[in-house]
Image (cartoon, coloured by chain):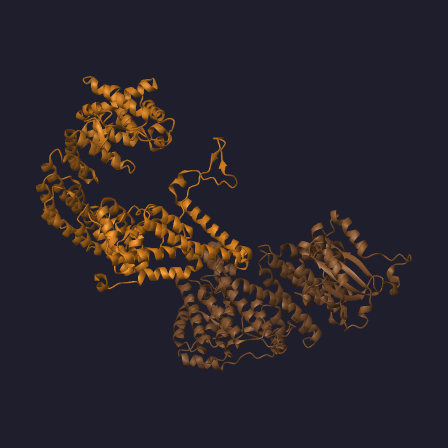
Amino acid sequence: MESDPVARQYLNELINESIKERKSSFPTDKFRTHYDHLCALKLTGKEWEKSFQLDYAALPVCFVLAEIAEEIMSAEIPSEPISALTFVYQFTELIREPNPRTFWYQDLAIRLETYVLLYLHENHQLDVTAFAESVTDDMMEETSCLRSMNSSFTKVFPFLRDDNVRQFQTIERLLTTPTKRYNILDAVNNLGEINPVKAAALYEYAKKHNGATYEGLFTHFYKSLYHFDGDHYLQEAMDLHDINKLECICALSGLNYDQDLHIRTAFEFMKDKNETDIDCMRILPTFYTRLIDNIHTPEDIRKECFTSIGQLTNTNDEQLKNSLIWRTSSLKGYDKEKMDLFPTFFSWGNPHFLTTYFDHFDSPASLFGFTREAFIEYGMTTNLNLFESALSTQQHVNIEKYNLELLQFLTDNLAIIRFAGIKILLRINGRSSSFSFLELNEKKQLRIIESLLPTPTNIEELLPLVLTLRNSPFPAVRSNLETGLIALIEAYGHHTIDMTKNCLDPEDPMDEELLNSLNAAFRKYKQEADERMQVKELDPIENELQHLELYFQLEHEKQAEMMEEATRQSIFAQLAKNIHVIRGSAFNTELNPEISLMGEVGASHLLDQRYSINPEAYEWNFRLNATTKNYSEEEDAV
Amino acid sequence: MKNIIIREYLESLTESEELDYIFPILLEVMGFKILSTPRLTKGLAQYGKDIVATGTDKDGVQKRFYFEIKGGADKDVTTTTFTKTDGIRESIIEAKDRKFNDSSNPGFDKLPVKIVLVHNGVLRANVKETFDGFIEREFPRLKKSKRKWWQSTAETIDCFEFERWDIYELTELFTQHLFNEYLLTDAEATNRFKKVLVLINTPRNNYADYLQLIDHIFEKAGALKSMGERKRLLFFETLRMVTFIVYHYSKDAHNLNAALKCVPYTVLNLWSWVLEHQLENDQKVIVHFDKCAAILYQVFTEFSNKTLTVAKRKNGLWAPNGGRYEQIGYPLRAMDYLSHLLLYFQFQRSREVSTNAKLEQQVADLVEVLNNNDGTTRPLLDNHSIPICLTLNFLIENGMEDEAKTYLQNIQHSVQIAHYTYQRIPDGRNRIESVIRFVVRKQKSVYYEDSTSHLFGMMLEYMALLGMEEAYYSFKKFLIDLNIHLGVFVPYDDQQLKDYRPENNLSHEANLLSRMLHSEGYQSEVCLDDSFADFQTKVFSKPVFTYIYRTQTAGYGYLLVLAHVYLKTPLFPSAWRRIKIST
């Protein structure tokens, strides 16, 4: 930093800006010069199209951050470790004000802690390893500034001047401490990436001192040193098979291969070994899928990997099955290969894997194909929630293909598929779909009306879509649409007209005609309703109030219980304190005397009045509409 | 307190119907002989004589009384009501000028005349002087002697006396002569009557006060032996008056529902009383009973006239303001409506001359109501068998077997759909609260009974009678799958009641007319045969409950139906096993 005052100045400005604005990223345009300079020095972190972050893992960044901390705290970093960590804790607490629970700065705190430990190690001869050993779990629990000690030690480990003997002792000790095992493996990984020479020496030392017996240790050494000397460490990993075959397979599965030769070698090695030990087999899905995902993998090997995955499905082991499903579903693309494996996975009887299985397909065709089969097989009982995530993903990444598939569903020959189409259309996360029904032929347009209008489950969403058909060139379509809308007056009263009106063009004479027709139908409906209300003998509020009140009281109870249940399951509610306000529209607390008005959060949907006339028949007709109105191929062709 | 209630009641009466109606009752009780009533002179120029009667005045002298009744908008004597055309002044002058001749009453013309202005309001101060002057002028007092004019018959023969009975006078007279006798003899009755009047048209009213008031009147009446002629008259008239009040209060509130709930209770109790005292052949008693029954008929007639047009529309019995409750309210109301409609048809037949046109209209109305209201096909309770049975019988008896079959099939269809969609079967214990809880919360109360059904037993027997083989098999399968036991309710006859329910001292008929039968009969199992023909044969050969109802003999068969409908006792198998199918 001494040698590059510009970088120091830029870092200073950016970090101060960050603290002032309480933001961890910076607009690239505004800080273009800063960005260019710091990026060249590899001091920037994550980047987006219009913004970037600083890389606090880089020591120069932390150096400047520490200077700013001293300036803000008006104190130097103490030389005693706990005081120094307290200094960091207080500093980070200060820069979070006035919202101390908003941790806006990402990894700034942990990186500063790491830097401070390293600073004490270098400048004040702190034995960081000994200090870390002295911090017990209880101390971490009780002392705020020590809570992230494990993580800080992981990050400072690669920079320590401890010799191999001391470092291996530290590794051995921490690998046998369950709460710290993963931290030290991370530290080994960091060491290989930051200081491969030292890591290689430490590996050689470990190899001579029985290091191969520690689960995960050599896997992390190979993984981090592979980029340093790929040939050597691939061979080392394969040689490990004679000593610890499970660790060998883990290591070969974890390597980030960068040569097709290495990939072929590893694949052939694995093929030769033909592992039958179940613990080893459980690792193989990772091995094969990582190879499939690797851009350097030759196509023939990739195919063989899928074949090998298929062979693994013959082994009846739950853990292996779960691994196969999870690893395969994580593969991006390979729709055909994944669909080939799908029947086997499905036959294992746990449909919940469907929730994520289609997430990474390139095209929604497979998903819709399977959905179709499911609805034909299971009818209206098909649980669409299982497909929710996959449908959302596909709608997000493949909107055009998704809409095309959905449109085919909505106009399908089979009623149940049209029903499935409506369900997909009305998914909570699926309402942004937009269609061009007008491109369909007359038959299909009529079918859209028939599918969506008679028993609409969510009229607010459906009506705007269906109303596009008022501009249909086919008179029968326009006529059916008008008839269908008039029938909805009984279901939604004047809302039908209001909703329709919102979608019409007041300047268009045909729209005006449609509106007039609806208004006339509504007037007739209203007149009859008014006449009906005049007959007090048939009025439930006059004559059946006790039953009516009981009904709504029970309904209210039911809703309250459902709300209670929802609150119990809400993560937000678990974090927050739950106070029931039993009277009043606002509340205050002793700590905060300000009166807080209670907000109203809610959403409402129009309910089809015809349901309350005869819910059983409505439900039944709905089912019939969804299951029995099928067309033949011939009809479709006309 | 009592006077205030009576005054409020009297003040609320309007001339054209109510005051005209009850005032003669008061006069009868006071011992007047009524020669002409507003009912008789309706539509004719009354010439100031709404009621003509003879009676003994306060002075002990027999007189002719011309009562001129003013109520409603004319109840107060004001400048307007006094001076307007056909107003008070004109009426009084006409009463005086135009003679009332009655040759059937010898000596009538010789009696002194007293014109009484009856009005259920007050004399306003601003017209008092004018009014008094008018009376003074038209009815001058004799000045010959200090004696009152009526003390010499010869002198007064062509003279007229005048009196004005205002609300206070009427209150006093009604209290003293009518209400006092039975109705409001104690604080409990007074309070009850007040509550009846105040609450009659309030929502949530279960009419318990009215029912208790009627019970109270019967209790106070005591034994028949201790009743003199006058007391018996008062007893009947009191019941008629109370019934009449309820009817008119309902009508004024534009909701006859209260009358539909209350009036049958009076009629059924009164008929039970008649039977209990073996008075069904006493013509005087029957005349009185008919007056009460006429009010009930009036209620049914007006109810049907008012509601039928709406009920015949598509889902006309559904109420839009009931919201989601209507999934219960609509079928409940539709079933009740069917009962009332069919009861009205029965009533109509017994009270009016039957014509083919009338009958055809009834059938057409019923079919239209059925076709437009699917609530009539959705039984929620087992005793919805009552309207269903009445409907089927009415259709069959009128040669509409096909419609009867369709209706039965629709019910079967609805029952099955209700089960397929929401697993609901009509509640055998007839508790609507249980049904509401089940529908709303999907919680089946321990009181919810859906493993035994009398309704389904009845439906299957109808299927046998109507030759509905296909429906029988499909319904049978449905019921067997659900393991529902079938039965029908058969009442004990009088001997069986003595044997099995010795604590019950009433006859079957008295029980039927006074309560919902439950322990007064037994459940007779209905077993389903594999073959429809076997089942049919069995149904045709099953014994039926035979009982000679005195009510039927007396020509009041519709009262038995009223008892079933009102007290919710399911109809007995004889109602359908005896029915004749024309095809």
The answer, for residue B31, to whether it is visible in the render is no
Q: How many badges with numbers are in the image?
A: 0
Q: Is residue A298 above or below residue A537?
A: above
Q: Position of residue B155 (x, y in %)?
A: 87, 63
Q: Is residue A99 above or below residue A364?
A: above
For the colour brown, the matching chain is: B
A76, above or below A349, in the image: above
Q: Nearer the viewer, residue B151 or A280?
A: B151
Which residue is situated farthest in the left direction here? A261
Which image quarter: residue A240?
Answer: top left
Q: Residue furthest right?
A: B145
Does the image show residue A432?
yes
Q: Is residue B334 above or below residue B540?
A: above
The image shows residue B440 at horizontal and vertical percentages of: 46, 56
Where residue B66 sits: x, y (%)?
76, 63
Q: Residue at x 38, y 59 (%)?
A: A619
Q: Nearer the viewer, residue A338 or A164?
A: A338
Q: Which chain is orange?
A: A
